[in-house]
Image (cartoon, helix red, strand yellow):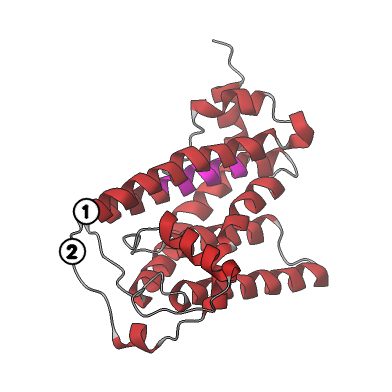
Amino acid sequence: MEKHWGLNPWRIWTSTWRQRNDWNRHRISISVMLALLIGAAAIYSLTNQLAAYRGWSAFDPKTILDDSIPFVYWMIIPYSTLYFYYPTAAWIGVKDEKMMRENIIFHQMLLITCWIVFALFIILPVEIDLRANISYPSSQFWQIQFDLLHTLDEPWNAWPSLHIVQSLLIVLVIRRWFPSQTKIHSVLHALLWLAWISLVLSTMMVKQHFVWDVATGIIYALVCWKYWFKPTLDIAGSDEGEKMFSNTFDSRT
């Protein structure tokens, strides 16, 4: 890995950056969300289906903890909140040009972290055999939620948990962009962490992930943040980053 892998802005953002003030500055927000949809969600689906088709597990990470964690059907609600994290980071990261640069570079790196995980899903797949004994109230609402979840996710999206990796990195970048400078911000940060902890617990309590998946997801995200994301975002938000974006996008040649 290069010291600042993903620091150079990709050419695919050329039109977006040149028109960055369009749509009340949310041209960037829409663009990075589309990039995640194509570059992460679509590829995830392919790797998930491929791993399921192969049906081969590299190892079994199940421990006694996985069997002792109860299934709690309503935890599918915090589990589903992951899909609010993506638009939140994309949408709020447009306060000024410095933040817009960081927004683009952050999502470039987020995509790269996803691709590394997708490679692990293929090279060292693990079947999550935890769904067999789950039961939930016989109502149409819960039936639809779990049918949709199990249809979209074959039990081969094990480690490290993308739910954990992506959500934790997004929480960390939101805290970077909006630090605790007031009591309101401190309260919002506390609520954000509470929501994230609920999401973490939900991944195990709806039997979508092993404890191993969650632990490796947290470790992977924290290591990436400390040694890769944070120093790279520091450069992207600096004068050096401004010059880099200018050299990449403002040239008409």
- Please give left or right for residue 3 compared with residue 241 in the image: left
Residue found at x 39% / y 47%? 45
Which image quadrant is residue 24 in? Answer: top right
Residue 157, placed above or below residue 111 = below
Examine the structure image and report whether residue 123 is included in the region drawn in magenta.
no
Spot occupied by residue 39 in the image (x, y as percentages of width and height): 45, 39
Q: Residues within 10 Å of mark 2 (few under 14, many from 20)?
A: few
Name the residue beneath numbered marker 1: 123
Residue at 60%, 44% (x, y): give it. 102
Out of 35 and 72, give the one closest to the viewer. Answer: 72
Q: Are marks 1 and 2 in contact (CB under 8 Å)?
A: yes
Mark 2: secondary structure: loop
Which of marks 2 and 1 precedes in the sequence? 2
Q: CA distance from mark 1 to mark 2?
A: 8 Å
Q: Position of residue 44 (x, y in %)?
A: 39, 48
Question: Magenta span has 107?
Answer: yes
Numbered disc 1: secondary structure = helix
**Residue segment shown in magenta:** 103-113
Quadrant of the frame with the C terminus: top right
Q: Nearer the viewer, residue 205 or 169?
A: 205
The residue tagged 2 is: 58
Residue 155 higher or lower than 237, as above or below: below
- In percent of width and height, residue 187 lies at 76, 73
Task: Choose top left, top right, bottom left or bottom right for residue 172.
Answer: bottom right
Report the amino acid beneath label 1.
Ile
Q: Is residue 9 visible?
A: yes
How crowded pointer 1 is (Cα within 10 Å; few <14, some 14-19, many 20+) is rated as few
